[in-house]
Image: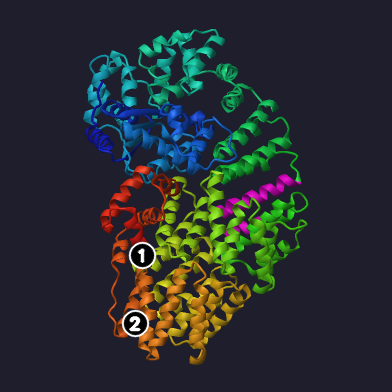
Amino acid sequence: MGLFGRTRECALIDGVLADVRAGRSRTLVLRGRAGAGKTALLDYATEAAEGLRVVRITGIESEMELAYAGVQQLVARNLDEAQLSELPAPQRGALEAVLGLRASASTGRMLVGLAVLTRLSNAGATTPLVCVVDDAQWLDRESAEVLAFVARRTHHDAFGLLFAVRETERGGERLPFEGLEELLVEGLAPAAACELMAAVASGPTDENVRDRIVAETGGNPLALRQITAGLSPGQLSGRLALPEALPLGTRLEQALLGVVRGLPEPTQTVLLVAAADPTGDESLVRRTCAALGTGFEAIGPAEAQGLVDLTEGIAFRHPLLRAAVLSGATSAQRQAVHQALAEATDPVMDPDRRAWHRAFAVPGPDENVAAELEASADRARRRGGLAAAGVFLQRAGDLSTEPGPRTARYLAAAEAHIAAGSLNAGSDLITLAEQQPRRNAFHDSQCLLLRGMIASARGRGNDAAPLLTAAARALEPLDQPRAVWAHLLALQGYLTSGHNAPADAFIEAVRAAGASPRSQPPTGIELLLDGFVAQITDSHKAAVPVFRQAFAALDTEDAGPVLEMAVYAAAELWDDSSHDRMSDRYVRSTRALGGLAMLPLALSARAESEILSGRYADAQALCEEMREIAQTTGGPGIIGAVLPAEGMVAALHGDQERARELAAAVNGYAIENRLGMLADVASHSLGILEIGYGRHAEAVRHLRFALTTPYFFVSTRVLPDLAEAAARADEPELACRAADQLSLSTQASGTPLGLGVDARTRALVADDALAEDLYVSALGHLRQTRAVLQMARTHQLYGEWLRRRRRRREAREQLRTAYEMFSSLGTRGFAERARAELEATGEHARQRTSDVAAEALTPQEARIARLAAEGASNPEIAEQLYVSRRTVESHLTKIYAKLGVNSRTQLAYIMLRAD
């Protein structure tokens, strides 16, 4: 039977298939209520995919706790050993780990995503490919995020993705497909609904009966089909009363259940086995049926009625049929089937699925099964399946026979969910743990710690900090390393709150952190905590040697999330080398953990390092990745990571409208969540924007906070900009105050970056006898650093100083260098200011051809061009940027055309001049 009233929807699907045939990747998400016709449209796509290879999988609600179950379905139907060996070694290892082919200490989610992307791209190069995913809302979290990642990263590959998503809450979590091209599948129009009813009715239908059914179902095709088919000729004609109206979902389930119950009992048994193990593994179903005393051939009547498809394994023709089969069985029947499936599953090859079946087979608490589930959680965590680990641990808690282990497992489950970004699930599990009898002090301290982590992840530092301090104090006699970590997180919460942090509570938290026990010798994390305590309670000079010891120790420790605070410390020390090293390690370690929830914070720290180095295209690409993660996970705290970095890039580029728009968004978020540090970051970006265009009085208005903010972090980095703006705005006293305060940190740190910025700042407020030596000294120090923008700004200020003293020839040299550097960096405001100053010396500023060409590149093209110029191969570029090799090839074609080159040698020359 064909489709009714779906001309528009079919045309859109035809367009997707046409793009894939032409080698242009495309994704479409079909969204609608149960029974709206999404599966029928996917059937249409499968039939219309002439010349394309189709791989089809279905999300199963009961499989949501099995990490990468969806990826396993997809890859198992699309990958043999030879194809696996074609993948780059890191990707091959990640995919083998999630397929259970090898053990792995840790598998990053994005590396798995890149492996799937590469595999699908390679497959599409041979025969264009369409991946069809029905009931995508029931995919396990790991698979859903991987496929959403693939959908967002594929651009120039011959494969497409079609997702069908039922509108459902899924525990209050956002699905990761938001932002992708979407088609809302709604009920049929009345005329099409009537056509469908006429096609399935057993006799003539009275107009009033027809109108009532159409109205009650809202035109839902599956409901129309099942309800109409279930009515007698007398009911259709209006001679007999219709059944009582029920909610649509209930009516659908009852209608489908009626179909199933009309089958022979052995057939129902086989269907129940197939529904209970959704792998579609016919061999496993056959073995299980035999153990239950039923032959597999009993499935025949179900196949004859079109309920199942046996072409490739066992597949239900509609996802709701599986749910109807499971809900229609008794609890005892389901337990017996799961027990038989557990016994038929190889404990060595698939221990997690065996444990999963055993968990559903037992009628009540069972410590042996709980221990198996705990082991499965550990394996899932090593594969990067944090959400799956959380579900395994929760089920292990449910089956625990003693209160102590039950509470511990609930808390471990909560921590896994928090790390995965499922904050609501984590909060619910903490509440469940708090309700358990006979809790001990460690359990209570864990509850405080985890609630503090949730508040922190939601961007509420003021709420998080008191909880974390209380947790740290409670943990000191129980788990000293964890106590130190909690103290550090508490300080971070207060510091990010900035001027909104209650001073008394903050100082008390600092004292508590300083008085907490230490190891002998102290660890890197302990030294990092000591450094912050010294900075807050004593001075920058006292903190510097402690921070340096911390950096040395952290280089050999597994620091994990603590590296965020190490990056902050490196910024305080004006240590660009440590900042680069720590931020890079922070990103790598966070990726390796597998969860996406914390990755934006690491990417934001890395973006700061790229901004310092003048690699704004790389910084912008990191911001785009943060946005992708925000769309995928919906994490509430992500906005605090992505918008400030984007705002600073926009300000440096001189994009005035965009910079102000982002600053307003950051400021609004900061006010809502009482995050003073973010408000300061927004003000700093606006100050930079104004300085670039020479509007110094406006810049002072934005930057004055640096002298009054109660804590450091942002203020230290703002002081040089405030001093410059104040000096140019004829506020010498303010400029001197900013310069003096800056020297307290830069002189104590003694780094080339700190000394260079300090010398330039003091030159602004010095008399002529000292100023020139200070500018020359600043340039000498900054040449030893990665801080390209600071170098360019120093040339500019020195050139401006020389011009005002009528030393035009020397001024031209400095201003020409500044202009060329600013043009290469793409900092339009600063470049315009340098151009005007240069022309005031009598020289006409000319932009180099390489700069003009390089400016035509998008941020992604600029990154690819730079990596190619540095000698990276296409596969190496693809792996570094998490895109497919074909996407790199397509971008390079565009890059060559834009730059007017035809070889990597020429590209390297252009990019070298641009740098």
**Would residue 101 be found to the left or right of residue 11 on screen?**
right
Q: From what the image shows, is residue 307 above or below residue 563?
A: above
Query: Mark 1 and mark 2: span between their CA atoms?
Result: 22 Å
Residue 462 is inside the magenta segment: yes
Viewer-proximal residue among 73 and 237: 73
Image quadrant in which the C terminus is located = bottom left
Circle 2 SS class: helix
Q: What's under tag 1, amino acid-wise? A: Ala
Number of numbered tags placed on the structure image? 2
Q: Specify few, some or many for label 1: CA neighbours under 10 Å numbering under 14, 14-19, or 20 or more.
A: many
Residue 865 horizontal/vertical position (percent):
36, 55
Kind of residue sitting beneath label 2: Glu
Q: Residue furthest front?
A: 905
In percent of width and height, residue 44 lies at: 28, 27
Between residue 797 and residue 399, name the one nearer to us. 797
| Quarter of the image where the N terminus is located | top left
- The crowding category of the residue bearing disc 2, from other C-alpha atoms within 10 Å (few below 14, some 14 to 19, many at least 20), is many
Whether residue 505 is visible to the viewer of this picture, yes or no, is no
Q: Going from the N terminus, do you reach mark 1 or mark 2 first?
A: 2
Taking the spot 25% from the left edge, 14% from the top edge, the residue there is: 203
- The residue under label 1 is 914
Residue 5 visible somewhere in the drawing = yes
The residue mark sitting in front, 1 or 2, is: 1
Is the magenta region chiefly helix, strand or loop?
A: helix
- 671 vs 194, left or right, is right
Query: Residue beneath label 2, please?
Result: 837
Question: Which stretch appears magenta?
Answer: 441-470
Residue 176: numbered disc: none
